[in-house]
Amino acid sequence: MNSFLLKRRTRAGILKCLLAVREVASRVLAPAGGSPMPRYVDPAVHRRRLRAALRTARETAQRTQRDVATAMDWSLSKLIRIETGVVTITTNDLRALLAHYGVTDQATVAEMVATARSARQPSIWSAYNDVVGPNFVAYLAHESAASVIRGFEPLLVPGLLQTPDYARAVLLKESTRPDETKVQTLLELRLARQELLAAGNDRPQIFYLLDEAVIRRVVGGPSVMRQQLRYLLELIEAPDVSVLIVPFRAGIYSLLRWPSILLEFADLADANMLYIEHPERDFLVREGEHEIPELGHPSAYLEAYWEVENLALDQSPREILAGAIAALDSR
């Protein structure tokens, strides 16, 4: 079987699996007081958490990397590659390393061993490497682990909130010569993200700021746009989704000019992550790492987000959406 067909089958299997998550969750969860179905956590997130835990354990034990490498009879480069995530660590090496650090609590050791095993698994998003860039694949790996997803869109309804028909209309316009196979694959990916985040009770809180231009721009024709706007009306009633619209009368506002998403994590080992679709290229930056030109770092972005959010609080999103639907109906 050629590699292209294999990837297509792999992607189809992933989508089928993710579509089943929601159904399984509804059957597995107890109707009242039941524990939520565990959320999917990508191997990349497990690797980051394991790296952070190992560095913390070494620093708590007051050992330098050279001290540890010598005591374990490893090369210094091996330990550095483990701590930076360049390579994974075997279960035997992990147990020996934890013993050297004085980590003997059985529950802690078992949890870290489980994390290491999960870190060695393939990501479900790796099947899409040929249709989206590496920064977006890295973003996808962390999206489902976030406790809060906070985004801004100046032009189009964000992918997580799109209807299938709206999404298809957008994807068909992303190239002067759209590839039908690629469009279908990207549509599958978009729906897979929506289904994965909707599964179970342990869902992230989703907050989106939309410029009014997003709901006034007719995408896919009046029928498709009307369906999309009505879907947004349904979404704003959900307890875990908030959509605010910055009205035209707010004028121009600073900093938030490009599609962007901030991921916030409940686990302290996971630094907040900012993804920006800049006209020149996309950017992905974590708190404490390098800054994005003109945009700074995640915490600075969050402050700017809150400033723009204040501009959207003067008018009900339901009122603005109803007005946009009425404008379509009057055509």
Image (tube, rainbow, N blue to C red):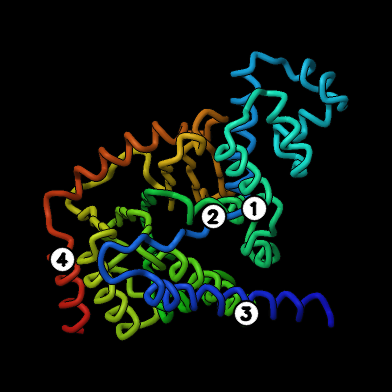
Secondary structure type for disc 1: helix
Q: Which quadrant would residue 255 be assigned to in this image?
A: top left
Mark in the foreground, 2 or 4: 2
Q: Position of residue 109 (x, y in %)?
A: 62, 38
- Packing grade of label 4 (10 A; few <14, some 14-19, many >=20) is some
Give the alpha-carbon distance from disc 1 to disc 3, as whole Å.
Answer: 23 Å
Q: Mark 3 and mark 1 in contact (Cβ < 8 Å)?
A: no
Give the alpha-carbon distance from disc 2 to disc 4, as whole Å.
Answer: 34 Å
Looking at marks 4 and 3 on the same chain, the residue that comes earlier in the sequence is marked by: 3
Viewer can see residue 189: yes
Secondary structure type for disc 2: loop
Q: Mark 2 and mark 1 in contact (Cβ < 8 Å)?
A: yes
In this rendered view, identify the residue nearer to me: 78 or 197. Answer: 78
Q: Which mark is residue 41?
A: 2
- Packing grade of label 2 (10 A; few <14, some 14-19, many >=20) is some
Q: Which quadrant would residue 239 be assigned to in this image?
A: bottom left
Q: Is residue 132 above or below residue 49?
A: below
Q: Which mark is residue 12?
A: 3
Looking at marks 1 and 3 on the same chain, the residue that comes earlier in the sequence is marked by: 3
Residue at 70%, 33% in the rendered image:
84
Residue at 70%, 32% in the rendered image:
83
Mark in the foreground, 4 or 3: 3
Looking at marks 1 and 2 on the same chain, the residue that comes earlier in the sequence is marked by: 2
Q: Which mark is residue 118?
A: 1
Looking at marks 2 and 3 on the same chain, the residue that comes earlier in the sequence is marked by: 3
